[in-house]
Amino acid sequence: MNFNISTRATQFTLLALLAGAIATVMAQKCPKDCHCDLDQKGRYRTYCNKVEWINPPTDDFEPGVEVLIIANARHPIIVGPVFQFFNKLEVLRVIDGYLPSVGDRSFWGLVRLKTIDLSRNNITQLSMESFRGQDNLIELDLSRNRLDNIASGTFTHMKELKTLHLIDNSITMLNARLFLHLAKLKYLDLSHNSIDDLPPETFKDVQDLKVLKCRGCRLSNINPQIYNILTHLTELDLGQNQIKFLDREEFLDLRHLRSLRLDGNQLSVIVDELFTNQKGLTFLDVSRNRLAKIADRAFENLSNLTFLDASYNKLSHIEPVCFRPLRSLQTLNISGNLQLDLSEMEDTIQVIQNVTGLVVADMGALPLNLFVPFRRLSALNLSGNHIDNITLQIIEPLANLSFLDLSRNQLNGIPERYATQLAAITDVKLENNPLICDWCHMGPLIMHARKLKYGLPWQEVPRCFLPERLREVRIDGLDQDGVEDCMEVIVDEDHDAASTSHNFLEQAGSVSILAACGLIIFILLAIIVVSTALCLSRHRARYYTHEDKRDTILEKNTETPTITTGSEINFKFPYNERVCTIDEMCIPPPPPPPGKVAPATPADRTAETVALIEYGSRIGSIPGDEPGPTSGPRTVTISSISQTASIHPDAPTATLVAAAAAATATAAPNGTGKPFTPKSILRKRTDTGL
């Protein structure tokens, strides 16, 4: 009786204290667009979101505020001496804003300040005076800013600092003595910066560091002197870098290491005795490398290792001797090693049969008797292994499961003999399976869910994929009368629902193949078009080149062509005009009447033409008939010959010779005779009717 009275009195006292605290909070100031309350530790907290002001309106704040959070400010907040107003402040967070810089001595006098969070801003530089006066600061977060170069001694005034976050900045180089006077620093995160080297001089002032994270940098190797300096490291994260090889003496000095992450690098082999001195190592992640081999003695002395992740590598076989030193192993992940044939690893499986957690995802077809030795298995991940209603029997030997992941498979239903087993598991994941919600496929599981008082205990209840009208509906929310029979579902759908369910993931693969084929065809067409365009352009270039050469030749031959009466006759014709020879001008004569002699042939005509030209040459060279000093050379043209003596084109040779002689005798002595050009030939040809 007395105990009950004292218990009730205590409850009333607590309620009274809580009511008093709430009343105190209600009576205190709280700025506009801010929310004021007590945090989990009972500290007075003010949370301001999307505020319009640049400087905090100190008149609207309670001077006794202990936690101040300013998030998503619409304008850049000025971090300066105005914050000295909050003399009882213990936690300050100015996040997700446009903060460009930190003013000198902005936090001077805030001796109770323990945490400063300025993450996700636009800070580009810091000075040695930015944090002056923060001798009691324990945690500083400058993640996701734009810091590119931090000068040595920037943090020298924070001698009590234990945690420093510099994640995702633009840091490319770590200056020597960067962490000067930070002897108490225990946690340092430099992840996701463009750092390709870790100078040992940088870490000489933080030799008691426990956690070092350099994830997502550009490190290809680590200077061994760093491990000689940081001998107290318990957690090392070098994931997502470019490390290709680790020597067996790489971690020789890290005797206190408990967690090591090497995932996302380019390692091809784990050599023997790499972790000889890491007897206390409990967590090892070597996933997403290029591991083709794990040496037989690679895990020597790792008797305390409880978690090993070797997933998504190129392993084809793991010897039993490799896992034999791992006597404390609880969780093993070998997912994504497509070349690993588990049916040939019976001896290795016998060595690891006592594990309680196993991840075998994205491995393809699995042996149906794979899990017979795993009697203690409580957590199993089988996602992405093409398991269907038939191959689901692989889980039948597992009676102690509390977690089972069957997502991303080809299950279109749960057979009745496995529905009871799945309903008894604490959490089952069936997402991304083409489940058909009818009595034929999901009826047994639906009935088991209805029998349970609180329904299925799973975090995510399965959702229907077919029929279409029930898509994305939870199976525990189905109306019993609305669930279709198996045959009706198949008839009502556009195509076989079971076939759709079974091949749902394969169809996605077919779409990918079709897309790849389309891309290849597009590339080939593009190559053909580009090649054709290049050929046409080259042809056009050659064409215009020949045209230029042709124009040049034509320009050189635009002079008036003449036939001189000297010792030789020169014919010069432009290339762009058609030249008609005497042979062309002579139209074949009509056939002679009977009894008459046939006209001369073209061959005879050619000989006559030659004789005519020779005759004109001889006439032009008659002695005593040379031109005078003021007269030019004689010019004899065919047109003049024709004008001097009207002759028929079919006239005999004697007539042509006489005409040539007459034309030569009447030629102008001063060289003013009509020049001989193709046009004159054409004109005469027209005049004569040829």
Image (cartoon, rainbow, N blue to C red):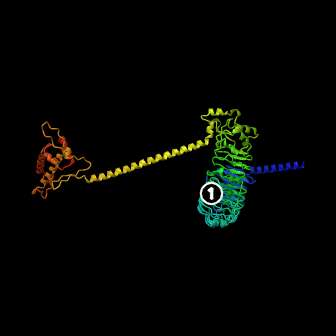
Image location of residue 345, percent across then percent down: 66, 52
Q: Where does the C terminus fall, quadrant-wise?
A: top left
Q: Does residue 252 sit above or below 409 in this rendering?
A: below
Secondary structure beneath label 1: strand
Figure label count: 1
Label 1 packing within 10 angstroms: few (<14), some (14-19), many (20+): some
Q: Position of residue 624 (x, y in %)?
A: 9, 57
Residue at the limit of the structure toward the left, as seen here: 624
Provide residue 593's location: percent of width, then percent of height: 14, 36
Q: Residue furthest right?
A: 1
What residue is disc 1 on? Answer: 293
As rendered, which of 39 and 640 lies closer to the eye? 640
Residue 57 image-quadrant placement: bottom right
Q: Is residue 123 visible?
A: no
350 or 591: which is nearer to us? 350
Direction from residue 72 to residue 613 in the image, left or right: left
Q: Is residue 52 left or right of residue 62?
A: left
Q: For this view, does 346 lie left or right of residue 625?
A: right
Q: Nearer the viewer, residue 92 or 613?
A: 613
Q: Quadrant of residue 256?
A: bottom right
- Residue 520 can be seen in this image: yes
Q: Residue 656 at what x, y percent from top left?
A: 13, 47
Kindly identify the amino acid type of the residue bearing the numbered disc 1: Lys
